[in-house]
Amino acid sequence: MRENKFKHFLDSNVVLYLLSADAGKADRVERLLVAGPIISVQVLNEVTQVCRRKLQMGWDEIAQLLELVRGFCKVVPITETIHDRARDIAERYRLSFYDACIAAAAVTSGCQYLFSEDMQDGQVLEDGLNIKNPFTDTKN
């Protein structure tokens, strides 16, 4: 993995755009991957669930996608510490618990940016974690 001076974390909804028919969004995600992002095991789980249930992909196809993604990303586990922090973040910022788990993993990993299409673009959470929708601004 490449070290990036601006550590960033990718939400599962962003990773899934690798499979999009929208070439602009898929290309944007590829650029984010090349920069060496961080993801959590939760992101891998959510991507797997969507690929299997909604996209009806086979297990081999899912394994290939996840192998590709993991080749560019540092993958962090979901720990009890992240779980506890997620509860605090969910309460304080009124996020869903699963979004808060993503945010807690990003904060715990020391990320500056959390790229997500589901959370509020421009919101700043704990320790200066900036929520960015990668499809509204191509400067990052």
Image (spheres, rainbow, N blue to C red):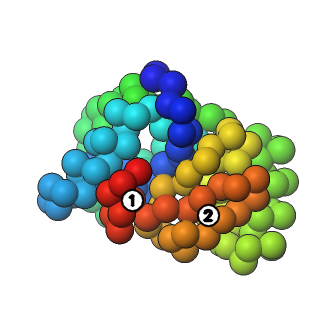
Farthest-out residue, bottom: 94
Can residue 18 be seen here? The reply is yes
Left or right of 38? Residue 21 is left
Image vertical order of residue 114 relative to residue 81, above or below: below
Nearer the observer, 29 or 76: 29
Category of crowding for the residue at label 1, using alpha-carbon neighbours closer than 10 angstroms: few (below 14), some (14–19), many (at least 20): many
Residue 128, image x, y percentages: 70, 55
Q: CA distance from mark 1 to mark 2?
A: 16 Å
Left or right of 137? Residue 76 is right
Image vertical order of residue 85 relative to residue 92, above or below: above
The numbered disc on residue 134 is 1
Farthest-out residue, top: 1
The numbered disc on residue 99 is 2
Residue 21, image x, y percentages: 15, 59
Q: Earlier in the sequence, mark 1 or mark 2?
A: 2
Amino acid type shown at disc 2: Asp
Nearer the observer, 122 or 56: 122
Left or right of 98? Residue 12 is left
Q: Secondary structure at mark 2?
A: helix
Category of crowding for the residue at label 2, using alpha-carbon neighbours closer than 10 angstroms: few (below 14), some (14–19), many (at least 20): some
Q: Secondary structure at mark 1?
A: loop
Q: Residue at x 82, y 44 (%)?
A: 80
Amino acid type shown at disc 1: Pro
Left or right of 22? Residue 103 is right
